Image: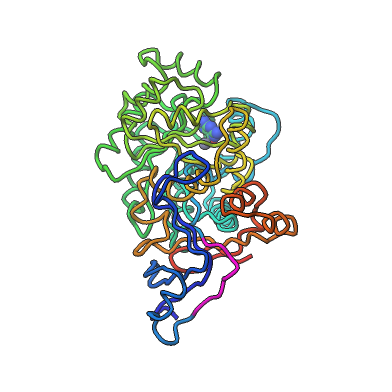
Amino acid sequence: FQRHGLVLRAELLSFDADPGDGDTPLPGTVRHLPDGALWLENGRIRALDDYVRLAPQLPEGIEIVDHSDKLIMPGFIDSHVHYVQLEIMASYGRQLLDWLNDYTFPEECRFAVREHADAIAEAFIEELLRVGTTTAQVFGSSHPQSMEAFFAASQRRELRMLAGKVLMDRHAPEALTDDTFGGIHDSERLIADWHGKGRLGYSVTPRFAPTSTRAQLDAAGGLLRSDPSLWLQTHLAENTGEIAWVAELFPESRDYLNVYEQSGLVGPRSTFAHGIHLDDEMRARLAGQGANIAFCPSSNMFLGSGLFDRRSAREAGLAVSVASDIGAGTDLSGLATLKAAYQVGQLRGEALTAWQGFYALTLGNARALSLDGHIGRLAEGMEADFVVLDTRATPLLARRTARCQTLAERLFALMMLGDDRAILETWANGRCQHRR
Ligand code: GUN
Ligand code: ZN
């Protein structure tokens, strides 16, 4: 069936640029085709247009999938998530440092066993596809085999994924603690085997400042300098206890961000999860170096970490991606992440628009991760990763959306009331890989 490709007829929605924070999107930022056609060929989008305009150009006999009453958007992107924490989601009653010691580290010890890593990698990817997420930036455990398992499972499905083995050489259980340079060598091996293979990329992954020595952070910076196509992911300024601990451990650094700057870890391909407790000066430094903050609202509320100041970040010109951060996050779903982001925004007096939410989940995250040359938009030549949404999937959604007068209202209802039942199909690399 792939010879001439395949066409989907549906309502199409995609962003060409940041719609801004107003109630109506900035001109030219949104592409909306109420009766559109999406022509796929060899894993990419060959063309898209209004159905009546594209139909005459289609080769005779090409398969047309009729999703006329459904909404297609680019596949959702999750900029920060821990696959190895899938089974400790919803562990009760701790804030960050106790949560790590009581639940997270013991769980991550299980990934020394390759078979376990294989099973959870598969389960995690199935969960991602079930909620419409086609790309994520993913933490493994410190065991290289956790990454072998994840990359292999992603490769089998031809997914675009970024991931890395956790680097940590102190302040963790013996079974999870790297030899300082052994962890770097393991990362180098994984980079050689997986970075740039298919649609996979490697993200160098020091867990966070407290669990790496300066020597290991410096060596991680060396990896980044050796290959500018690598990514970096870590955590920054999530919790006040964490920040006090970092100040004790790194007295030579002027603040938490400076620990990473001094090791050469801050650049345009760096994602720092959380960034709740920053000042304007740190935001300006992050923005100046082109890094992004992964805003993880359900995680921040679950661990009681605080309410992210999205407005100040945006005013500083700092890119903000959105992320689930499970197992501290309470839901893998991008829709649920937007709902939580809206709630955090309300508590700060800055209501997130649906435009801004769905932009963040698609093109915004793709840009923050420097993946916008491949994914994040429905446009000619882009990789065919997208989600088919049913905005009438449940009786309640059907009732609510029936009353919506505008697209903005319908998108907002979807982001507040939608869940995995609204994800009818998830397509990646031109193939339907999940159907409800
Ligand atoms: N900081 C260091 N490690 C972690 C983690 O696994 N989850 C979260 N939320 N914060 C962290
Ligand atoms: Zn995290």
Residue 289 position within the rendered picture, expressed as x and y whole percent measured from the top left: 31, 31
Residue 427 placement (x, y as % from top left): 50, 64
- Compared with 173, 426 (above or below) is below
Furthest-right residue in this view? 395
Residue 114: give x, y in percent of width and height: 52, 51
Q: How is the image coloured?
A: rainbow
Q: Quadrant of the C terminus?
A: bottom right
Question: Residue at position x 45%, y 49% from top?
Answer: 147
Q: Quadrant of residue 420?
A: bottom right
Q: State left or right for residue 114 relative to residue 189.
A: right
In percent of width and height, residue 411 lies at 58, 51
Give yes or no for residue 98 being in the magenta stretch: no
Return the residue nearer the eye: 352 or 220: 352
Dominant SS type (magenta): strand
Work out whether residue 84 or residue 256 is closer to the camera in this orientation and state it.
256
Which range of residues does the magenta coloring cover? 64-72
Left or right of residue 419, residue 184 in this image = left
Query: Is residue 154 visible to the viewer in this orientation of the structure?
Result: yes
